[in-house]
Amino acid sequence: MALLQIAEPGQSPQPHQRRLAVGIDLGTTNSLVAALRSGLSAPLPDAEGRVILPSAVRYHADHIDVGHAARDAAARDPLNTVLSVKRLMGRGLADVKQLGDQLPYRFVGGESHMPFIDTVQGPKSPVEVSADILKTLRLRAESTLGGELVGVVITVPAYFDDAQRQATKDAARLAGLNVLRLLNEPTAAAVAYGLDQNAEGVVAIYDLGGGTFDISILRLTGGVFEVLATGGDSALGGDDFDHAIANWIVEQADLSHDLDPGAQRELLQTACAAKEALTDADSVSVQYRDWQAQLTRAAFNALIEPMIARSLKACRRAVRDSGIELDEVEAVVMVGGSTRVPRVREAVGELFGRTPLTDIDPDQVVAIGAAIQADTLAGNKRDGGELLLLDVIPLSLGLETMGGLMEKVIPRNTTIPVARAQEFTTYKDGQSAMMIHVLQGERELISDCRSLARFELRGIPAMVAGAAKIRVTFQVDADGLLSVSAREIGSGVESSIQVKPSYGLTDGEIMRMLKDSFEHAGSDKVARQLREHQVDAERLLEAVQGALDADGERLLDAEERLAIEQQMQDLRDLMNGTDGSAIEQQTKRLSQVTDAFAARRLDSTVKAALAGRNLNEIEE
Amino acid sequence: MAISMTEAAANHVRRSLEGRGKGDGIRLGVRTTGCSGLAYVLEFVDEPAGEDQVFESHGVKVIIDPKSLAYLDGTELDFVKEGLNEGFKFNNPNVRGECGCGESFNV
């Protein structure tokens, strides 16, 4: 029977109408899925009890590995194993080339400007790779919750632009997920601590992961989180702490600096273990091969001080960018595994003058917040007491005007959903068309902003310059995605575009991916049919063998028996192959050959049953 | 007349109440709905109503209204894992038939 969860008072769901929704933290290194069950938001573990799914996908010719197995194989099969795909989401080929030789993949250009990674399964876009990660999490959630998901909330960094958000949404769609909302990661962390229940205030989210550092300053007013500023360092994280300890070992043990990769990995593992031990211990014994020494927490703190200082500098800058003072920050939330380091907590506490919030596992807090939001959005809190959390657009949206200038139509930090219109006019006599160039960014020159889309409004009636009234409407839906329409008011001619950010997928590419997934559905179906035929064949073989053993001697002559056994052998030979229809045919043939035998067996049974009785007895 | 919980169920309810930060216990009940007539209710309780009956099992309060008690007398609430899925299960001796999924039943 279905297993039940505890509901809030008066909100037991109708049978068969539980609306299952989960939150997904789609991270650069690791991903998680969490759900609210019996009033508790918690990450969902896999069958081995692990909640973290490494964001790694390895493509084999005939199947795909996602997670631990893929990550562990990265060194052996670098070309077909994709790590940190989040860095590529919504990026163009040119952007990716800028990342330079850091990435081992072979990139090929797609129909759009999107980079495709050439794997043994053919070119894969970052969207497809992310979809494979999301699919794994979806299956885990569905088997854990025991039903299909109504929807998901997926978290994205606050600084993700439209193209990166659109790419994330496309990946979800490809994974068969209905996205209720994309939620900013810092907002999700604040929700996990219930900070959205406060009336208002400024919150800082300090997110120090393995390889990146993000600081976000949010202002809460009337249930709406507004991103005041974001900052950080894309090359600062816990891995740097490991390197600091590793360098210390190299110096102390007087090792040569050019270690082979194997020794280096071993050294880093030793360093990482020491770092983790120092979270609870004041001093730890570090052993590397035949060298051994004590590392105190004070010495470790000194090693990492420059990195912590860099993060605090970014914090101060973000606070300054927000136009607030440090003491206006009312709560500081710690996110990311590296915030377990005691010195990090201490330093952040000193900077903001208050103890940071650390009760919730910093690796899980984003997914936990997303799950709470997903549950609300799925409609599981029907008393209406909860405010729906709103987000704001991270960068201003506007269009190009004469002279290559950006005219902002929706300023950044406007809460979404939102629609704004502005009137423009023609600049030449008799101008019959107008190019609308949609941009995103804060700068004045369009060359400094990001181009999202272009479209043309045609059929403007001939008028003198400045007489046409063209109303351009920008509309942003709850996920932060944009549609723009332009209308000449006098004549009513209209044109519009759903913003497919320049780096997003073209419809053709999306179609191809959907088709791919259909094709897979086809091969899955063939595999299932084959299995069904094999099972039928097995069942028949067993039945015939049983019958032969029981009555073969008595009811069959040698020739008949040989014919049946020949057909059985043929079927056995086919059974291990992959030709389902051949198995089906041979099964039928065997069944036909044994028809006469079956009939004779039936006769003999009936005769035995009737022997020695008279008609009256039988009629009863 | 009695209602009870297994230790596993009680532990899980206690953890849920702690995580939720408030609540007096857990409400068991039935409603007339669903494909087989009646459906189970399993909810947190913030304020028991005057006519509610309260049982205690492994230190956790089980609260039930008298009408539901007629259908649930002798029931043991269990917490079970089935593969990755986990949740509560009503072992109700009064049930005569239930729908395929067990979410609704009749007596």
Image (cartoon, rainbow, N blue to C red):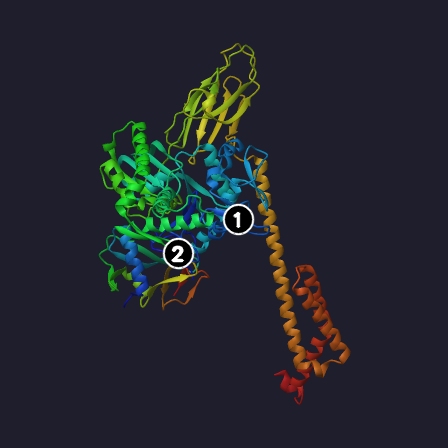
Residue pointed to by mark 1: A58
Left or right of residue A334: residue A159: right
Residue pointed to by mark 2: B33
| Rendered image quadrant of residue A610 | bottom right
Relative vertical location of residue A448 with respect to residue A153 in this rendering, above or below: above
| Rendered image quadrant of residue A529 | bottom right
For the residue carrying disc 2, how many other residues have a C-alpha within 10 Å: few (<14), some (14-19), or many (20+)?
Answer: some
Left or right of residue B12: residue A93: right
Relative vertical location of residue A442 with respect to residue A429 in this rendering, above or below: below
Please state the total of marks drawn on the protein image. Answer: 2
Q: Which is more toward the observer, A353 or B26? A: A353
Disc nearest the viewer among 1 and 2: 1
Left or right of residue A64: residue B58: left
Q: Residue B72: give x, y in percent of width and height.
A: 33, 64
Look at 39% across and 61% down and name the residue there.
B81
Q: Residue B71: give x, y in percent of width and height.
A: 33, 64
Chain bearing tag 1 is A
Residue type at mark 2?
A: Thr
Q: Residue furthest right?
A: A559
Left or right of residue A431: residue A215: left
For the residue carrying disc 1, how many other residues have a C-alpha within 10 Å: few (<14), some (14-19), or many (20+)?
Answer: many
Look at 42% across and 28% down and name the residue there.
A419
Label 1 sits on a secondary structure element that is strand
Q: Residue A28: give x, y in percent of width and height.
A: 43, 42
Query: Gap between marks 1 and 2, in whole Å?
Result: 48 Å
| Rendered image quadrant of residue A570 | bottom right
Q: Residue A373: give x, y in percent of width and height.
A: 37, 43
Name the quarter where the N terminus of chain A is drawn.
bottom left
